[in-house]
Amino acid sequence: MLWFRVFLAVTTAALAVWGGTSGPTEATPTPSATPTPSPTPACRATATIDARWGNGFVATVTVRNTGTESLDRWRVSWRWSGDERVQTFWGGVAEAAGPDVTVRNASYNGTLVLDGVATFGLLVTTSAVPDGLTTTCAR
């Protein structure tokens, strides 16, 4: 029995010196990920109705790079509120699905330096000319 007391004393002393335990160890907690801030828009689109008449209008949309680096492409979207129909686009490539319209840059105006601008235009027929267009711009 003496050998057991000596073994126990030596084991306890060794554990105290090395700081270990003979039982299970606790897992080291993994730090949580830092939340990624939402990106700021890389561009802003502003629509101006240049001319209006009873059943239509002409508008120019200016796309400005508001980001922190050059853009290699841009996309502007909006939703019609009534019976608007685009007759002609220039300065961009348009896609429409019902009331939703998206215009992407043309091959020659997609690259925008910091604070650089590009424009596109449209000729629209409608029964009621809107006061303006609410646009969103994205890369």
Image (cartoon, helix red, strand yellow):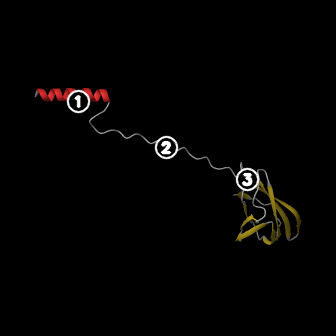
Dot 3: within a 10 Å radius of its alpha carbon, few (fewer than 14), some, or many (20 or more) residues? some
> Going 54% across and 43% down the picture, which residue do you hit?
34
Q: Is residue 3 left or right of residue 76?
A: left
Q: Mark 1 or mark 2: which is in front? A: 1
> Going 83% across and 69% down the picture, which residue do you hit?
123
> Going 15% across and 27% down the picture, which residue do you hit?
5
**Residue 68 on image: x %, y %:** 71, 48
Alpha carbon of mark 3 to alpha carbon of mark 2: how far? Answer: 33 Å
Q: Which residue is mark 2?
A: 32
Which quarter shows the N terminus?
Answer: top left
Q: Amino acid at mark 3?
A: Ser
Q: Earlier in the sequence, mark 1 or mark 2?
A: 1
Name the element at disc 1.
Answer: helix
Please report contact status of discs 3 and 2: CB closer than 8 Å, yes or no.
Answer: no
Q: Taking 35 as reference, is 8 above or below it? A: above
Dot 2: within a 10 Å radius of its alpha carbon, few (fewer than 14), some, or many (20 or more) residues? few
Q: Amino acid at mark 1?
A: Thr
Please report contact status of discs 1 and 2: CB closer than 8 Å, yes or no.
Answer: no
Q: Earlier in the sequence, mark 3 or mark 1?
A: 1
Q: Earlier in the sequence, mark 3 or mark 2?
A: 2
Q: Is residue 58 left or right of residue 44?
A: right
Q: Which residue is mark 1?
A: 11
Dot 1: within a 10 Å radius of its alpha carbon, few (fewer than 14), some, or many (20 or more) residues? some
Alpha carbon of mark 3 to alpha carbon of mark 1: how far? Answer: 67 Å
- Circle on res. 70: 3
**Residue 40 on image: x %, y %:** 68, 49
Instruction: Using the rendered image of the protein, determine whether residue 98 is visible from the camera's viewpoint.
Output: no
Please report contact status of discs 3 and 1: CB closer than 8 Å, yes or no.
Answer: no
Q: Mark 3 or mark 2: which is in front? A: 3
**Residue 41 on image: x %, y %:** 70, 52
